[in-house]
Structures are given as C-alpha cells and as structure tokens.
Image (cartoon, rainbow, N blue to C red):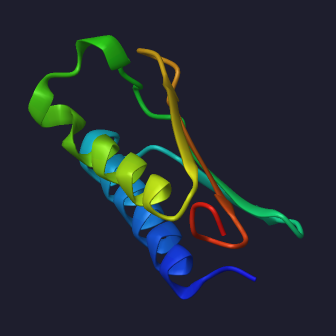
C-alpha cells in the first residue's frame, strides 16, 4: 500500500511537472503514465516541447527540478530527468509502495 505522504508527493511532483510544461513549453503535448505493481508506483511525465540542456540550466532554473527530486526522495523514491534541446522532456518518478525509506 502507498502511504498517504507518498500519494501527496506524487501528486505534487505531477502538478509541478505540468506547471513547468505550461510555463516553459506552451502548446506542447503532454503524456502522463502512472503504473503500479505490488512493489512500486512509477509515474512518467513527457512532453514534446523544446526541451533544454540540463547542464546549462542556471541555479534559479533548477529549483523546481530539485524540489521534485527532494519530494521523491523524501518518500524513498527516485527522480530522473531526460531532456535535450529540440527533443522534449521526460520526468520519471518511482516510489516504493511502502512509501518511506527503510520501511
């Protein structure tokens, strides 16, 4: 079972990701996939926007991505970003069903 705090963190990550698409890639199409099994929940948020170079983002531009990563890690999960200029962006979040590190 997924803990209530893990549920909230997944929802917040998805909200932030969708906000980022609206802010940085207006008009882009977005795909959201949410899969579960007995061990974990896996969410993928992908867009066909302009993408970006992860290495070239300034400190202020990383705040939202860093917050999403911290949210996932706070419930024992992982967070990954894939993006390249001209290729859209994909965020992947995986959270264990237990929802808490070491549970």
Q: Nearer the viewer, residue 70 or 23?
A: 70
Left or right placement of residue 50 versus residue 31 in this view: left
Depicted 89 relative to depicted 43: above or below? above
Q: Nearer the viewer, residue 30 or 41?
A: 41
Left or right placement of residue 84 versus residue 77 in this view: left
Going by the picture, which residue comes out furthest to the bottom? 4
Left or right placement of residue 67 versus residue 101 in this view: left
At which x and y percent is residue 46?
Answer: 57, 43
- The count of marks equals 0
Quadrant of the drawing holding the N terminus = bottom right
Q: Nearer the viewer, residue 28 or 39?
A: 39
At which x and y percent is residue 33?
Answer: 70, 58
Going by the picture, which residue comes out furthest to the front? 102
Q: Residue at x 40, y 69 (%)?
A: 12
Q: Report which quarter residue 63 is drawn in.
A: top left
Q: Residue at x 41, y 15 (%)?
A: 85
At which x and y percent is residue 37?
Answer: 88, 66
Depicted 22 relative to depicted 91: above or below? below
Q: Evaluate whether residue 53 shows in this view.
A: no
Left or right placement of residue 84 versus residue 53 in this view: right
At which x and y percent is residue 56?
Answer: 24, 12
Q: Report which quarter residue 65 is drawn in.
A: top left
Q: Residue at x 32, y 58 (%)?
A: 19
Q: Nearer the viewer, residue 97 or 60?
A: 97
Quadrant of the drawing holding the C terminus = bottom right
Q: Evaluate whether residue 97 shows in this view.
A: yes
């Amino acid at each position: 079972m997924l803990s209530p705090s893990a549920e909230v963190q997944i929802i917040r990550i998805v909200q932030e990701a969708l906000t980022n698409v609206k802010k940085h890639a207006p008009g882009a199409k977005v795909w959201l996939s949410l899969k579960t099994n007995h061990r974990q929940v896996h969410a993928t948020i992908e867009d066909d926007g302009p993408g970006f170079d992860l290495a070239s983002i300034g400190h202020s531009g990383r705040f939202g991505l860093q917050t999403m990563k911290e949210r996932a890690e706070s419930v024992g999960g992982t967070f990954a970003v894939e993006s390249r200029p001209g290729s859209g962006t994909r965020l992947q979040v995986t959270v264990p069903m237990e929802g808490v590190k070491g549970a």
